[in-house]
Image: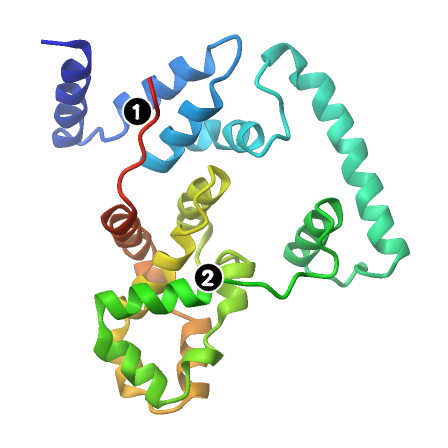
Amino acid sequence: MTEDSQRNFRSVYYEKVGFRGVEEKKSLEILLKDDRLDIEKLCTFSQRFPLPSMYRALVWKVLLGILPPHHESHAQVMMYRKEQYCDVLHALEVVRFVSDATPQVEVYLRMYQLESGKLPRSPSFPLPKAFEQYLNLEDSRLLSHLKTCSALSKLPYDLWFKRCFAGCLPESSLQRVWDKVVSGSCKILVFVAVEILLTFKIKVMALNSAEKITKFLENIPQDSSDAIVSKAIDLWHKHCGTPVHSA
């Protein structure tokens, strides 16, 4: 039996006895022990598996380029990053893009826009079109209902795609979505939105105005969030394939 087949056998065994994720956690720990972290393998791991909470912050920082791949530089670089954060925040306050009353989510967005040269925000925003495309593939009748109610253009796209579901999903579910976003797959946001519509299809089909549909989708029940994210990840794999890293 090859090493890969042994690992696959162990993964299936752990899952059957109720210890799903044990093998994945060990694999991640091995990746994190490398003197120079392999960004591509960390990206692939993040897209294929949920990150263990104890390692999530570190992996996100490395994938986002906040920390370098070399362990020995982490402490010094974090000190520089904290100084950078204070400088950018101060600049936004000076030009009055943010204030003490600005929601923290928007502060982070403005900081990113300033550093990436996109302040004010670019009007180009393709994710709603992809959302319509995949919803049509999964349930064309539901899409037709949204169009009939003139709701398609009024869906909470800002909440879904610009705030990446912050304020929509509880933290435990949100972290699983952001694992994929941080590792480079923003398209997962589209499939979460699609799955929300599919999950609450009966409720949405019973509503006959754009305002009622939008209001409901902005405040969806929280008890089904984990199932929504799991099904959204399955949809993402179905339409986009399962990520693999090169040898």
Which quadrant holds the N terminus? top left
Q: Are marks 2 and 1 in contact (CB under 8 Å)?
A: no
Specify whether 196 is left or right of 119: left
Q: Secondary structure at mark 1?
A: helix
Q: Nearer the viewer, residue 180 or 222?
A: 180
Residue 112 in percent (x, y) is at 68, 48
Q: Secondary structure at mark 2?
A: helix
Amino acid at the residue labelled 2: Leu
Q: Identify the mark at residue 209; answer none if there is no mark.
A: none
**Residue at figure coordinates x 44%, y 40% from the top left:** 179
Using the image, determine if residue 81 lies above or below residue 106: above
Residue 3 in percent (x, y) is at 19, 10
What residue does disc 2 label? 127
Residue 166 in percent (x, y) is at 52, 57
**Residue at figure coordinates x 22%, y 71% from the top left:** 139
What residue does disc 1 label? 24
User: Marks 2 and 1, Cα distance to the nearest angstrom?
Assistant: 31 Å
